[in-house]
Image: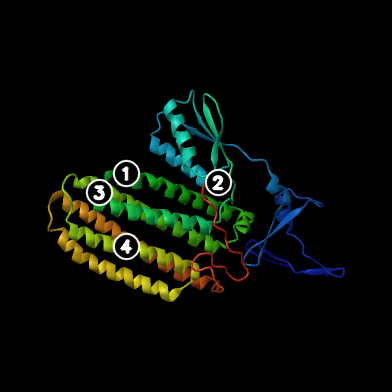
Amino acid sequence: MRSTGGFHGRRIQKTGGSTFIISLPKNWVTSRGLHAGDSLAFTPRPDGSLTVSPEEAGNAEVLRRVVPVSNDMQEDYLIRRLIAEYIAGSSLLEVRTDGRMSARTRDVVRGFAQRVIGPEILEETSESVVLQDVVGVNPLPIPSVIRRMHQMVRAMHTDAMAALRAQDASIARDVVERDWEVDRLHWFMEKQVNSALRDARVLSSLDLTLPECSTYLLTSRLLERVADHAVRIAETVEMFEKEKPPPAVVTELEKMATTATQSLADALDCLEQRDIPHANAIIDTVHRLVQERAHVLSEVVTRRGRIAVGLAYILESIERTALYASDLCELAINHAVEGPEPAPTSTGTTGVERPGRRASAVVPIP
């Protein structure tokens, strides 16, 4: 037996004709209240290791987590607290006030339940609202969530530029409202990865390694920020009021926006395909776009007042979108180095299947 810093080594022994056994560290058994005859669960992990846990842990009663709030708490503060509890993986959440819960507080809690994936209102009293996660830890394959986020983000950017060209405030408002859809998927991703970090069985059910979980979470964060820039572009439409921006400048911005969003889509393909040469080519494309920004900016600064400010905001958001695509390419390169290259398939850029791993199915997002 070897024991170093909390890690215990055990030799495999053979008993009978085909049975292999190992002994368990005594301090681990006693600290968990286990005894001879108790059952253990063995969870295989994608990296080839095994995780040992008490079998009863999977059937343990769900504990109710109480979140004390006050009726005079600002709405943003309450929303942030509820999101934090959601990401932490609380499956049964009781939001409680000291005394009767105000209608405003109750509306905030109800609105939160409608904007995230999983929690539903289980019961209400005069002092509390109880939310239960009815979805569970693994309802949607993480790669499918990333693809859905990208589709939404790209559509938001396209519509934001369309609103700019047509000076259509209704399209712009629609882009702003859709930002919540991207946020809810990102929070769901954070919740999934946090659950996988805490419980190896969740990680095994996701069919991902820890480095892959980290890569997908970073990808989700980049897409969420790209959505924020689509919102920023849409919000500038109101700045122009009755004075339209110069058509020539708008045309240049549209070309840059197309390059930025296409680079983002190509970067996501590189992540799936582990395509390092293509990722480097996309980074070069982004560098050329950043250099082009200086030429467009020189034209923007010749304008006056709100026109110049609005166009500068849009230009900056397009540039940031392209730079996030470059960041995603760097993630794709890191991801390619971490694991084996995918086996060739006839499915195109989506549904790439890695050797020895099942491909994730595309599941509708609730």
Task: Say which label, 3 or 2, has the lower sequence index.
Answer: 2
Q: Which x, y percent locates residue 280? A: 39, 74
Given residues 301 and 54, the one toward you in this image is 301
Task: Say which label, 3 or 4, has the lower sequence index.
Answer: 3
Kindly identify which numbered label has been placed on residue 173: 1
Q: Which x, y percent locates residue 101? A: 47, 26
In this figure, which residue is indicated by the disc labeled 4? Answer: 258
Q: Given contact means CB atoms under 8 Å apart, are the residues at marks 1 and 4 in contact?
A: no
State the SS at label 2. loop
Mark 3 or mark 2, which is nearer to you? 3
Q: Which quadrant does the N terminus fall into?
A: bottom right
In this figure, which residue is indicated by the disc labeled 3? Answer: 236
Q: Given contact means CB atoms under 8 Å apart, are the residues at marks 3 and 2 in contact?
A: no
Residue at x 57%, y 68% (from the top left corner):
353
Kindly identify which numbered label has been placed on residue 39: none
Residue 328 visible in the shown view = no
Distance from disc 3 to disc 4, alpha carbons, whole Å, reads: 18 Å
Q: Amino acid at mark 3?
A: Thr
In this figure, which residue is indicated by the disc labeled 2? Answer: 89
State the SS at label 4. helix
Q: Which x, y percent locates residue 206? A: 59, 57
Mark 4 or mark 2, which is nearer to you? 4
Task: Say which label, 4 or 2, has the lower sequence index.
Answer: 2
**Residue that sits furthest to the right in the current view:** 16
Q: Amino acid at mark 1?
A: Arg
